[in-house]
Image (cartoon, rainbow, N blue to C red):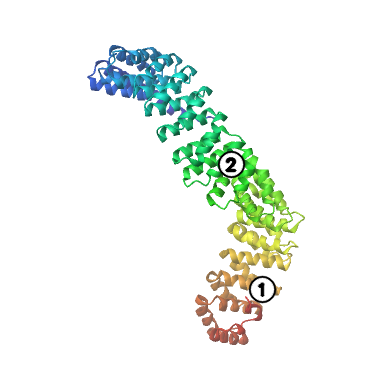
Amino acid sequence: MIETRPILILLVLAALAVPAVADEVDNLILDLKYGSDEVRKDAAVSLGEIGDPRAVDPLIEVILNDKRGYTAAAIEAAKALGEIGDPRAVDPLIEVLTSGFALGIKYKENAAWALGEIGDPRAVDALIVALSEGDPITGTAAEALGKIDDARAVDSLVRTLNRGSFPARIKAAEALGKIGDPRAVEPLIEALNGATPEIQQSATWALGEIGDTRAIDPLSYRVLKHEDSGVRSYSAEALGKIGGPTVVDPLIAALKDWDSSVRENASIALSQIGKPAVSPLIVALNDENPDVQNGASDALMLIGEPAISPLIVAVEGDDMRSRERAARVLSDIGEPAVEPLIESLKNEDPHVQFVAASALARIGEPAVDPLLTVLDDENGSVRAAAAFALGNISDARAVDPLIGSLKDENENVRSNATEALVKIGEPAVNPLIRTLRDIDQVSEVRSLAIIALAEIGDDRAVNPFIEALSDEDDEIRFWATVGLVVIGEPAIEPLINATNDEDPWVRMWATTALIRIGGPAINPLVDTLKEGARDSWLKQWATEALETEEDELLPPPLISY
C-alpha cells in the first residue's frame, strides 16, 4: 500500500503556500499603484524578484504613465519587466527607449537591459538606434543585442566596436561573439590591437566564439607574445574553441607561460582539440619544464578515451620516464583504461608490468575484477604484478584469491600476495587464521599466513599463534613465535600461560617469545621463573639470557630474526 500521509501533508503545505505568495503579490501591486514614491519603488523591485506574470500589466502602467522617468518607481519598473521576461512588455519598453523626452539615463538603460533579457527580435531596431545614445546606454544596448542574437545588428555593432567609448567597444565585441556572424571576424582581428587590454581580451573571446580559422595566426602570436597575461589566457581559450592541428604547437608552447591561468587555459584548449593533440601532448610529457608536463597530463586526462591507445604505446615504449608519466595519465583517465592496462601487464618487460600495475592500483575498485582474472595467468610475472596491484587497492574481494596465491609456484607471486593481504588488513584476518589452522595446507602457505597476520597485528591472531607453538612442523613453531613477538604486548598474558603448557616445545617457544618481546614481558616472565619452571634447563637458559641479553643464548632459529 502506498503511504499517502506524507503526500497529503505536502499538498496541504503547497495549498497554504500559494495563497501566501498570491497575497504578497496582490499587496505589492496595491503598493505600486497607491504608495508613496519610495514604497512604489520598493514594490517594483520586489515584484521583479518574485517574477509573477500578474505584475506585468501594473508595471507597464507605471512606465506608460511616467515616460520621462521622473520617478524611481518607473526606473525600477522597467528593470522588473526584464526580470519577469514577459513579451507583453516589449512595445512599452521600446517606447521608453526611443522616447525623445525621457529625462533619466538610468530609465533608458534599464529599458535596454530589460529588452535584452526578454530577447524579442522586435527590439532590435530600437536597440540599434540606442547604440548612438552614448554611455552607459550604448554598452547596455550592445549587450542586449548580443542576447537577442540577431544578425541585423552586426554592422551597427562593428561601428560601435570601431568608434565607441572603451566600455562600449568591450560590450560590442562580446555581442558580436555571441551573434557569431563571420562578417565580424576581420573587425575583431583589428580590435586585437585595441587601445586597452580589456578591449583586446573581449575581441579575443569573441573570435573564439565565432570559431573562424582566419583568427588562428593572430591568436597564435598573441598567446605566446602578448605582454598582458589576460590576452594570452583568452587567446589560448579561443584557439581551443577554433581547434584544428595548427593550433596545437602554440598551445603546447603556452604551457610554459609563467601565468597559471594561461597554462590552465592552454591545457583545457588542448583537451578540446582532442585526438589531433594527443601525440604532441605525449611528447610534451617528457618536457624538462614541470609546468609543461603537468599541463600535458591534464589535457590528456580530459581528452580521455581517444588518448588511451597512444598512451599505452608510450607505456610499452623504450623510454622509462615516458612510461611512468603515460601510466599516470591512464590512471587519471580511470575505468576506460583498465583493460588496455591489463594487457600491458602481460608485456615481457618487468618495468612495463610494474608501471601498468601501479596505474591499475591508482584506478582502484574498477580494476579489481580484471586483476583477479589475471591472478590466474599462466605467466608468473603477470600474476605477481596483479597481486601487487590488488594489495595497493586493498579490496576485500581479493582476500580469498590472494590466499590461494600463497601456494603459487612463483616466489614473487607468493611474496606479493602476502604483502597484499597485509595491506588489505582486517578483512583478511579470519581467512588467514583458517589457513593457518588448516593442517592440510603445505608448511610454507601456513607460514606465510602467520607472517601476514603478524604484520597486520590483529589481537585475534594471538591464540592461533599460541596453538601453533605445539605444531608438529618446526617452521610453523618458529614463525608462530616470530608472530607473537611482532604482535607484542597483547600476546604477553597468553604466552605466560603457555610457559606451563604440557608440550615442552610450547614452553620453550613461549619463553623465547617473551624474552624477545622484552620490556613489559620481562617481569611476568621473571615471576614465572621464580615460581618454578617445569624445565630446569629452560629456567637456567632463560635466566642466563635475561642476564646477558646475548643473542648467542637464544635458540638458534631466532638468532637471525
Q: Earlier in the sequence, mark 1 or mark 2?
A: 2
Residue 477 is marked as: 1
Quarter where residue 465 is shown: bottom right
Residue furthest right in the image: 378
State the image coordinates of residue 313 (x, y, percent, origin top left).
Answer: 69, 48
Q: Amino acid at mark 1?
A: Arg
Residue at the spot of label 2: 249
Q: Is residue 327 above or below residue 225?
A: below
Nearest to the observer: residue 404 or residue 222:
222
Q: Secondary structure at mark 1?
A: helix
Contact, mark 1 vs mark 2 (Cβ under 8 Å)? no
Residue at (44%, 41%) from the top-left corner? 227
Residue 4 is marked as: none
Query: Does any portion of residue 16 appear in the rendered image?
Result: no
Residue at (67%, 44%) from the top-left corner? 310
Neighbourhood count class around disc 2 (C-alpha, 10 Å): few under 14, some 14–19, many 20 upward: some
Q: Quadrant of the N terminus?
A: top right
Q: Is residue 312 above or below residue 470?
A: above
Residue at (65%, 45%) from the top-left corner? 337
Query: Does any portion of residue 383 appear in the rendered image?
Result: yes
Q: Compute the Cα span from label 1 to label 2.
A: 66 Å
Q: Is residue 36 left or right of residue 362?
A: left
State the image coordinates of residue 490 (x, y, percent, origin top left).
Answer: 53, 69
Quarter where residue 424 is shown: bottom right
Nearest to the observer: residue 333 or residue 52:
333
Q: Is residue 536 above or below residue 143?
A: below
Q: Is residue 182 above or below residue 525?
A: above
Nearest to the observer: residue 154 or residue 14:
154
Q: Amino acid at mark 2?
A: Asp
Q: Quadrant of the C terminus?
A: bottom right
Neighbourhood count class around disc 1 (C-alpha, 10 Å): few under 14, some 14–19, many 20 upward: many
Q: Secondary structure at mark 2?
A: helix
